[in-house]
């Protein structure tokens, strides 16, 4: 059994967010009624999705949409396409989105949804039909001031454009109810590059706070999709040495640094990291010798059992609930600084807010100005959380959750008083 993991407690997203929430609620002295109100989704929908396969078989899939809390504004959350997707994981993601939006002071609540399927086992035509069927089943929940869908696991711009198109065919409204669309369909151009550069700015700031080298910072990047490459490119631009890049289908490592420009060109022609001959293929990123580990992986990837392999001095949690409480205790005890997901993944909600604002107002902000705005917002969020942690002598995660819960609870008191 991993050190620090209680007997009988399974390390997963649901248990992690309960521990994080309760720790902050205890510190804030939150009343039990408010705890209940803030920890339970206000609406959930489960839908059955029949799909006629290309070989004429009829297969049934299950889809979900969970809306956690909308007291601060419309709910915002990803759409996922994952084999074995369960509603408990989506409840945890939706709640995490509520806190992430609150700590970044973005006027949204949290939501999450998706389909339990493996897109790799579907033809393109099947995937489109299934995606559109899901949009048709949940469209009555969506809306620019109700529920805004954002891209999640295996949901690229094409899938989000299908959802947006299906929504528009069923309901009158602007394209702002669905984000992450192709730029020609109203999406934000270069959204992943913008988020990657904001994350790179955060890495640089946190590294300085942790007395790491100003130049030549050795960084390993793991993500569920090709956003890993965008982050690696942004980090390379500020002088970091990228020792590993990993996505869902595989990864690459090179102790002297990967030529990110050459890798980007390879990905443009080949469509993936596979086959690049300038680095060795790897499935292990967490245990590599590096200064910084940027990890946007499935929930609970870094747990009490796996965290012992981490050699980085700074870990940036760039997607929700990657690190379990037991893993964080272990890292902290070893002197590793952890920037939690409520801060490390702030860029994604800020980029989503920018696309939503553009769509609602019919505007288009110049990319350089938007980049500065999002960079500043990410760094402001980080500094506020860091300062609260130092002032109250608590960790960054507890400081982030405390700030987020305070903001949401304040709005709930105005509504239910």
Image (tube, grey):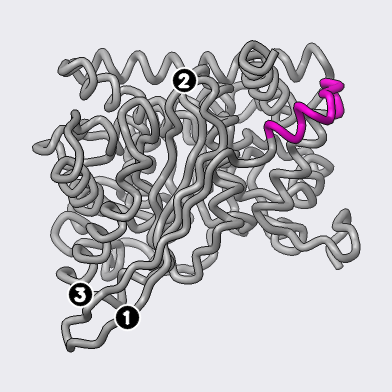
| Near-viewer residue (398 or 49) | 49
Of labels 3 and 1, earlier in sequence is 1
Locate residue 271: give its quadrant: bottom left
Q: Of the residues under marks 1 and 2, which one precedes in the sequence?
A: 1
Element under disc 2: loop
Relative to 396, 93 lies left or right = left
Residue at image location 26% in from the left, 70% down from the top = 275
- Residue 37 counted in the magenta span: yes
Image coordinates for residue 233, horizontal then vertical, percent: 32, 40
**Residue 181 seen from this side:** yes
User: Which is more toward the observer, 78 or 306?
Assistant: 78
Which segment is the magenta one? 26-38
**Label 1 environment density (alpha carbons within 10 Å; few <14, some 14–19, many ≥20):** few
**Magenta span: chief secondary structure:** helix
Camera-nearest label, 3 or 1 = 1
Residue 339, given in percent of the width and then of the height, sits at 62, 33
Q: Is residue 305 above or below residue 32?
A: below
In terms of image quadrants, where is residue 334? Answer: top right
Label 3, secondary structure: give it: loop
Instruction: Specify whether residue 316 is in view.
Output: no
Marker count (numbered)? 3
* Mark seen at residue 59: 1
Checking the image for residue 123, the label placed there is 3
Q: Which mark is residue 106?
A: 2
């Amino acid at each position: 059994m991993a050190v620090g993991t209680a007997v009988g407690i399974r390390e997963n997203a649901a248990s992690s967010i309960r521990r994080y929430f309760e720790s902050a609620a205890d510190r804030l002295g939150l009343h039990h009624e408010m705890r209940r109100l803030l920890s339970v989704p206000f609406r959930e929908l489960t839908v059955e999705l029949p799909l006629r396969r290309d070989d004429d078989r009829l297969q049934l899939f299950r889809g979900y949409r969970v809306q956690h809390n909308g007291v601060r504004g419309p709910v915002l959350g990803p759409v996922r396409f994952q084999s074995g997707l369960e509603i408990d994981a989506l409840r945890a993601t939706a709640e995490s989105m509520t806190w992430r939006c609150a700590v970044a002071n973005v006027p949204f609540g949290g939501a999450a949804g998706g389909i339990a399927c493996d897109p790799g086992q579907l033809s393109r035509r099947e995937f489109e039909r299934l995606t559109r069927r899901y949009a048709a089943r949940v469209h009555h929940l969506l809306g620019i001031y109700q529920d805004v869908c954002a891209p999640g696991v295996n949901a690229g711009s094409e899938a989000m454009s299908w959802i947006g198109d299906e929504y528009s065919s069923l309901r009158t409204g602007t394209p702002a109810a669905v984000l992450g669309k192709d730029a020609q369909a109203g999406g934000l151009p270069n959204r992943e590059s913008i988020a990657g550069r904001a994350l790179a700015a955060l890495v640089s700031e946190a590294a300085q706070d942790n007395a790491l080298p100003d130049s030549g910072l050795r960084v390993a990047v793991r993500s569920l999709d090709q956003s890993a490459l965008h982050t690696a490119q942004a980090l390379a631009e500020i002088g970091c040495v990228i020792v590993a890049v990993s996505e869902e289908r595989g990864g690459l490592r090179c102790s002297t640094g990967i030529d990110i420009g050459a890798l980007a060109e390879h990905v443009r022609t080949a469509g993936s990291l596979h086959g690049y001959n300038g680095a060795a293929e790897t499935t292990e990123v967490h245990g590599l010798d590096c200064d910084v580990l940027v990890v946007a992986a499935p929930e609970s990837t870094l747990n009490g059992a796996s965290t012992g392999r981490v050699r980085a001095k700074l870990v940036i949690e760039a997607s929700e609930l990657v690190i379990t409480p037991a893993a964080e205790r272990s890292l902290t005890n070893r002197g590793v600084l952890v920037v939690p997901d409520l801060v490390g993944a702030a860029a994604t909600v800020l980029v989503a807010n920018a696309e939503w604002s553009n769509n609602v107002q019919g505007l288009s902000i110049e990319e350089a100005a938007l980049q500065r705005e999002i960079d500043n917002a990410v760094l402001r969020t980080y500094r506020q959380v860091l300062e609260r942690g130092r002032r109250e002598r608590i960790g960054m995660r507890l400081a982030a959750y405390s700030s987020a819960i305070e903001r949401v609870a304040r709005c709930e008191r105005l509504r239910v008083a």
